[in-house]
Amino acid sequence: MTLSPLPIIRLLPKTKPQAIRRGYPWVYANEVVTDRRTRALEPGTIAVLEDAERTPLALVGVNPNSKIIGRVLDGPEGTAPDQAWFEARLSKALSLRERMFPTPFYRLIHAEADGLPGVIIDRFGDTAVVQPNAAWADLLLPQLTAALAKVTGVTTILKNAGGRGRSLEGLDDVDAVLLGDAPTGPISVEMNGATYMADLLGGQKTGLFFDQRPNHAFAARLGAGARVLDVFSHVGGFGLAALAGGAVSAHCIDGSDPALALASEGARQMGAVDKLTVTKGDAFDVLTTLGTTDDRFELVVCDPPAFAPSNKAREAGLRAYERVARLSAPLVSEDGYLVLCSCSHAVDMTAFTGACLRGIGRAGRRAQLIHTGQAGPDHPLMPQLAESGYLKALFFRL
């Protein structure tokens, strides 16, 4: 057998290799022999993972500074990633998106589920925004950039370094223009008949949340002819979709003035600016205040940020989701609809549903659950990694 020129990291004897063999993509620091050689590896080093009997299991990107010390990139027979390797992964991902979406506005790479662990790439026409949230991808960013341009034909590639994952990996928080020229202003994106303004440089995440696209569409059907309240609205995701679907009005609540300005501009471009109102403020405070008024809405949507981004925050997060449900349910008119969303990795659907039902019940309302939603097909789920199915949307009739 030819010896690999790559360094080796090895599982501890107590660590069973079955999970890796069945496709689990992460290796934790407490599962491997962390000797002096392993600790000395440069973050991002490509290595061969072996079991305790020295049988090769996988090719991994190593980061000795992370709790996830290894991210599986390929089988044990694979070669270290180069531009051609990235081109193959990107082409496979692109073929799915081109089949599903008529225009090039989507998530192109959804990390582990698309075979690029820790990497997020959102596409906005001729511009792509890359979040290299793992050390191996950060180290190989030039090869990834070249492959991305070749496979997709995009002319501008931006690096977004704001992801929480980068800080956990010990990586910098410096954004950069990797190819072409930075956009001079927000980019307009059409989805579900609505127009959204995406700030690719100063907005949240990569500038727009493509993951809610199918849930926007379902909510828009419920919102026809309705007064709509969109809480934690960002750039007007649900509110603008509802207006496109025939809502009579939409009121957006968010804590960010820039996000609300983008929502208003989207409504203007849709010719619906007279149907949109916005309020800047803490969502809990605004919901509490609205509860003291006679204002009621046929459709209320609450799509908050991740209240439970880690297992440590799980219980506090569930209490926050319950509070959102308790404050928003009284604002829904009789036989109206309440949509509650979570993007928390640490809260599964069962726990989230329980928290929402407790909140609705404590508000004195009775609910029918009519639909459960998740992210669109450009955010595929890796079955072995529950965290990749993070988005949950519950549609209730009250």
Image (cartoon, helix red, strand yellow):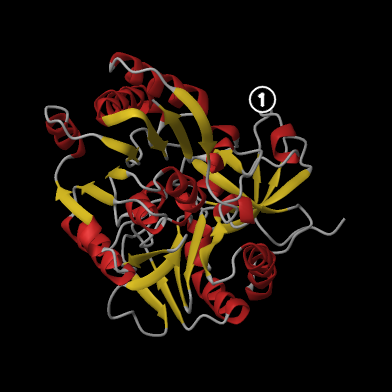
What is the quadrant of the N terminus in the image? bottom right
Residue 373: percent from the left, percent from the top? 52, 39
Label 1 neighbour load within 10 Å: few <14, some 14-19, many 20+ = few
Judge left or right: residue 242 versus residue 5: left
Q: Picture quarter containing residue 189?
A: bottom left
Q: Of all residues shown, which one is farthest toward the front?
A: 225
Residue 185: percent from the left, percent from the top? 27, 76
Which amino acid, by three-letter code, is at mark 1? Lys
Q: Secondary structure at mark 1?
A: loop
Q: Of all residues shown, which one is farthest toward the right?
A: 1
Which residue: 36% across, 61% down? 161
Relative to 34, does residue 396 appear above or below in the rendering? above
Which residue: 71% across, 49% down? 58
Relative to 142, does residue 302 appear above or below in the rendering? above
Residue 136: percent from the left, percent from the top? 53, 59
Judge left or right: residue 288 versus residue 95: left
Which residue: 67% across, 70% down? 91
Judge left or right: residue 166 versus residue 199: right
What residue is disc 1 on? 14
Give 336 or 68, whichever is nearer the viewer.
Answer: 336
Relative to 3, does residue 102 appear above or below in the rendering? below
